Amino acid sequence: MLPSLFVYAYLSISSAITLVNADAGKAIFLLAGQSNMAGRGGVVNDKWDGYVPPQSSPNPAILRLSADLNWQPATEPLHRDIDYFRACGVGPGMAFANSLLRQDSSIGTVGLVPCAVGGTNISEWARGGQLYNQLIRRAEAAVAGGGAIKGLLWYQGESDTVNREDAELYQRRLERFFDHVRHDLVLPALPIIQVALASGAGPYIERVREAQLGTWLVNLRTVDAMGLRLEPDRLHLTTTSQVTLGEMLAQAFPRDHPSPIISQASRTPPNFIYIYFCFLFFIYSNLF
């Protein structure tokens, strides 16, 4: 009798542990950086023209996390309630998600988490600052209801081309930012796809680009936006360029990467002490 009880108890415990990690849910991607990630495609004189290209159209399999931390159908502009000080237009997020689903329909549902804010310097994204804290808070909220953070899409650096010191310190600050995000999300191998600048707000564009293209970390890939068409302001990508960039980001995503940790709950180890006492009680009740 005891062997069968042990087998049954083992299966029960295994099932309990499996349930903790069962809700794979959404494939979640964090979108962070400044205005070209937030999206200014179709924005002229701080007004969006309202045009959504087919590649960025809504898809029932694509959701976005709103500013009040609720999942809703994703539509352009993705950052409308996050980067709200300026008009937002088309960014790379929707084209990325649609392209990713076309390439691999087994992904299921894609959850996009907008976090980018225009005009921000890399030092403003340092750990402990408002932007960093918001990124981590939104990432944790995104997985709370089930899902796995599959990657961080990062497009930032235009503001760091203004000052020579910022440009020279960019690589060190960028690497520290990536390390901190991975550590604080408990995802040491989190895939990161960064975008090398297509433009800048100052004279040190090439210095920041050198830092971006010269950054080598595990599971970090870089997509080069140089050469993509810009809006008349010579700073922001056009709608067409944002679509191209989104598709480039999808192409760069490492599909062979093992699934990161699933959901907030799965980051907390199962309560083995509780399970152990339940196991003892089960044995005791069946013996006596």
Image: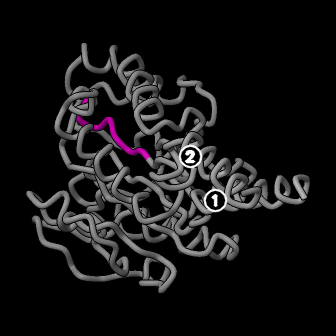
Q: Which of 55 and 132 is in front in this view?
A: 132
Residue 112, quarter of picture: bottom left
> Does the residue at mark 1 contact the one at mark 2 (Cβ under 8 Å)?
yes
Residue at 26 percent of width and 52 percent of height: 35
**Left or right relative to 191: residue 39:** left
Residue at 34 percent of width and 73 percent of height: 71
Residue at 22 percent of width and 37 percent of height: 201
**Left or right relative to 156: residue 179:** right
Q: Is residue 198 above or below residue 69?
A: above
Residue 175, quarter of picture: top left
Looking at the rendered structure, the kind of residue marked 2 is Pro
Disc ID at residue 237: none
Q: Which of 103 and 182 is in front in this view?
A: 182
Circle 2 crowding by C-alpha within 10 Å: few under 14, some 14–19, many from 20: some
Looking at the rendered structure, the kind of residue marked 1 is Ala
Q: Nearer the viewer, residue 73 or 12?
A: 12
Circle 1 crowding by C-alpha within 10 Å: few under 14, some 14–19, many from 20: some
Residue 223 visible somewhere in the drawing: no
Residue at 17 percent of width and 38 percent of height: 130
Q: Position of residue 163 (x, y in %)?
A: 20, 21
Disc ID at residue 270: 2
| Magenta highlight on residue 39 | no
Quarter of the image containing the N terminus?
bottom right
Disc 1: which residue: 16
| Magenta highlight on residue 156 | yes
Q: Position of residue 126 (x, y in %)?
A: 27, 27
Q: Position of residue 248 (x, y in %)?
A: 57, 57
Of mark 1 and mark 2, the one earlier in the sequence is: 1
